[in-house]
Every structure is written in C-alpha cells, then in structure tokens.
Image (tube, helix red, strand yellow):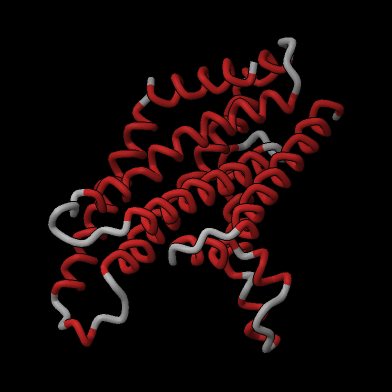
Amino acid sequence: MIWVIARREWVATFQTPLGWLLLATNQALLGWIFLRVLDGFTGLAPPERSAGLNLELAHNLFGSAAVLMLLAAPLLAARGLSGEAREGTFELLGAAPVSLLQILLGKLAALAGLMLLVALLPLGLCLTLLGAAPIDIGLLLAATLALWLVCVLFCAAGLFAASLTSQPAAAAVIAYAILVLLSVINRADQLAGEAISVFDWLSWSQHLFWFQSGVVRVSDLGYFVLMSALFLALAHRGLANRRLG
C-alpha cells in the first residue's frame, strides 16, 4: 500500500507542471553556479587556489543545491499533505484500509524519489568534465548522497509542519522556521565558546560538510536517518491528534 500511495503521488507530481518546473529551475540555477565555479577556479593561479576543483564543486555546487531545496521541499510537502486536507481528499484517503503511517511513508517515498532526481542534477553537471579535468567520483558520490539525505530531511520536516495545519502556506512557514533553526543552531556553540556540543550536532549543515569533504561517517548517516524518522513520528502524532479532534 505504501508504494501505491507513493506511485499516486509521483504520477500526480509529473502530471502537473510542478515537478518539471522544479527540475528545470534547479538545472538552470545549478548550471549557472557550475559555470561560475569553473570560471572562478580557472581564473586563479595554482598557488591562489584554496582547494581543488572537486572540493570547490562539492561545497559550492552541492551546497547551493541544498539551499535551493531548503526553499522548495517544504512547499512540496505542504502541497502533498495540507493541500489534500484543505481540499478534503485526505479524508477519502484516510477512509481507505490504510494506516496513517503508511500514508506518511508513501508520501515521503514519493518526495524522496523526486529529491533523488534533484540530487542527481549537480552530479550530472560535474560528470560533463570527465576527460577534461581530474574528477573524484567518490567525493562527488558522497556529496550526492548527502544532498539526497538532507533533501529527505527537509521533506520530513515539511510533512510534520503540514500535519499541524490544513493551510499549505502556514505549513510552509512552520517548516521554514524549523529548518532555519536547524541551520543556525550551531551558532550557539560559537556564542558559548564551545567547539562541540549538542547544538553543533543538531545542525544539518555540519553533517553535510563532512560528506562534501569526501568523509562518510556513520554518525552523519545516523543523524539524517534519526532526524527524518523523528519528524515523521511527529507528523504521525499530529495527524492522529487531528483525526481524534
């Protein structure tokens, strides 16, 4: 049943211009950033380069893609959950012999599939350099994995926000507030003069950095899995409360 719901969501996304517009917009913006990175890198003499081309691409191109999806993912999640609640189709889905958890997993699976396509866009741009520059495939694959994981986290946070309200705009605002907090929470370490703390661990950007540096750590993988599961559990509780209320 999870895959039936996921397939329904996937088909609905690409039957409208939304999915295509998301991919086209990201491709255009990332293509421009890709060319800017190449232009800035080739314009520097070797002693002036602070990092190699692969690291520049991993941090700038994939980092920019993560920021773009921070803006887009909550809107997609809000459309998929709050929009249905507002239009009354969620009640029809809830009346079917399917649990709330299956509904959430199906919607998250559809979003994760879309996010995979988005995560492959910067990788495709980087692969155009094969034969023209030394490309570190391992580093770029690690950055691609991180980008996909962080996008799934954004979608899970968006589903949680959407479980709290039937208004997509309000759900998007709540999701943005959560994600911005998780983006800057590590600044508390700097104010406190501490190098490592729970605030640093909670920041998604800190975990993304290690992947973009070519270091795949179990702790970073665990962070994205645990945080996504936490938001999914909170979304389940939110929907259960709304059903009871």
The quarter of the picture where residue 121 lies is: top left
Q: Is residue 103 left or right of residue 73?
A: right
- Give whichever of 201, 219 is nearer the camera: 219
Q: What is the residue that sits farthest to the right in this orientation?
A: 244
Where residue 5 appears, as percent x and y from the top left, is 58, 19
On the image, which quarter does residue 22 sit in? top left
Quadrant for the N terminus in the image: top right
Q: Position of residue 169 (x, y in %)?
A: 56, 43
The residue that appears at 56% across and 63% down in the rendered structure is 207
Residue located 85% across and 29% down the image: 245
* Residue 93 image point, x, y percent: 67, 16
Q: Closer to the camera, 94 or 203? A: 203
- Depth check: give the residue in front, 216 or 162: 216
Q: Image check: 73 left or right of 242? A: left
Examine the rendering and report whether any part of residue 105 can be seen. Answer: yes
In this view, 71 is above or below 52: above
Q: Residue at x 56, y 48 (%)?
A: 154
User: Residue 178 appears at what percent x and percent y?
Assistant: 64, 56
Is residue 203 shown left or right of residue 17? right
